[in-house]
Image: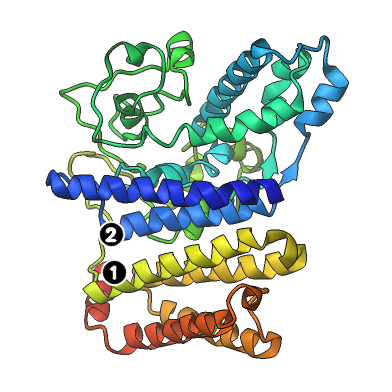
Amino acid sequence: METYANALLYAIPFFVGLVLLEILYGYFIKDQKHNVMDTVSSLSSGLTNIVKDSLGLVLVLVSYPFLVDNVALIKLENTWVVWFVAFIAIDFAGYWNHRLSHHINIFWNQHVIHHSSEEFNLACALRQSISNLVGYFALLMIPAALLGVPSEVIAILAPIHLFAQFWYHTQHIGKMGWLEYVIVTPSQHRVHHAINPEYIDKNLGQILCIWDRMFGTFQEELDEVPPQYGVLKPAATWNPILINFQHVWRLFLDAWRTSNWWDKFRIWFMPTGWRPKDVIEKYPISKIEDVYNFERYQPSTSLALKGYSIFQLLANTALMLFMFYNYSEIGFNNLLIFASFVFVGIYGYTTLMDRKSYASFIEVFRGVVGLVFLYFMGDWFGLNAYLSWGGYLVGLYFMVTIFGGVYFHTSDTGFSRSESILSS
């Protein structure tokens, strides 16, 4: 986990830098594909994911090292061949994992966050799950284990394979000629993120598009069918933590409400979107019917709230980077406390972005708790060892957070209007 945290120290600034470049490019060509609140929500989702993953908060059913040690039939030599086989195996497993996520109710919950944005841009790529609490991916890597592909090779290639899926989340790159027959391109992935009936559950490949062509899930982007983005049951919130668990909460409610015991069990493993008949009748859920004409989630937002949201995103990113930088010195128990501050912070300011009245109390509460923590500890998880005034800087941040909570509850005139819009 420490190695992963160290890698993120370089990966995060790189990805954020590319998002900023895309924003600037869209501004200069007057074809902006970002809006402030959606992009802040997407980047905030990325923060929650990497904090959760860096702490290893997952129940692993079986690990790849265990499989390769116990089921290998042969052992490939450490040449270019083993790297090639490993890459193909990871990509093949990724395709089927992705396909499961789109077609089985319970697996959709761990993937819906990635599709929840009604925009499509590089920031959207960073909408990643924190609800994937059970690790089963190694089971899909059995072919590699049977061939004896070393676990060290998989450990190196797996994050590279993941990071290589970032670049094609953009609308600024058109079709790419012959490459459309080899790799997943922005055009193909726009189709994947679209909610148009022609595009649903298509183009599930991650790096190579050959799996989609082989297994009948490929769909070309059509000029006459412009992609529309999001999910058919809109998230209707900027809060990535809520989005992560919306679907599983609906499944739980349906399982509780149905009178059919068989339905209570099978709902979790039925095709995505399946609901018991008696629940559909009593508790209908609205879905987007016309993908070209639906009300996108855009509560009224003041310039002050946009600025505050960006400030909180940057502040929490800085806190998280310090957590990774000082990972081993902080220790696991303190890392959990640190991560809790980040998670509550993200929950607080993204709920404020939703214009929920209780969000201001969250902001004030976490600001006060942060100041109390600083007072009793005299430091912020060892920050003073690097900056003598580091504790004062973090204290100032918590004071700004308290002020923000009070201000947006009492003085931001757009608050009451947005509340009425959301409740209508």
Are the residues tagged 2 and 1 within 8 Å (C-beta)?
A: yes
**To which residue does mark 1 refer?**
306
Query: Of helix, strand and loop, which one carries label 2?
Result: helix
**Residue 258 in view (yes/no):** no
Q: Position of residue 198 (x, y in %)?
A: 29, 24
Mark 2 residue type: Val
Above or below, 307 against 214 in this view is: below
Q: Residue 338 sits in which quadrant?
A: bottom right
Q: Position of residue 290 (x, y in %)?
A: 22, 39
Q: Position of residue 25 (x, y in %)?
A: 21, 45
Decide: few, some or many residues near mark 2? Use Cα within 10 Å; few <14, some 14-19, many ≥20.
few
Side (left or right) of 79 relative to 320: right
Residue at coordinates 53% horizontally, 80% vertically from top-left?
394
Above or below, 301 against 229 in this view is: below
Alpha carbon distance from label 2 to label 1: 7 Å
Q: Which one is nearer the viewer's eye here, 181 or 155?
A: 155
Q: Which one is nearer the viewer's eye here, 157 or 347?
A: 157
Q: How is the image coloured?
A: rainbow
Q: Tag on residue 36?
A: 2
Query: Of helix, strand and loop, which one carries label 1?
Result: helix
Q: Earlier in the sequence, mark 2 or mark 1?
A: 2
Residue at coordinates 28% horizontally, 31% vertically from top-left?
196
Mark 1 residue type: Lys
Q: How many marks?
A: 2
**Residue 305 in view (yes/no):** yes
Side (left or right) of 53 relative to 359: right
Side (left or right) of 234 relative to 254: left
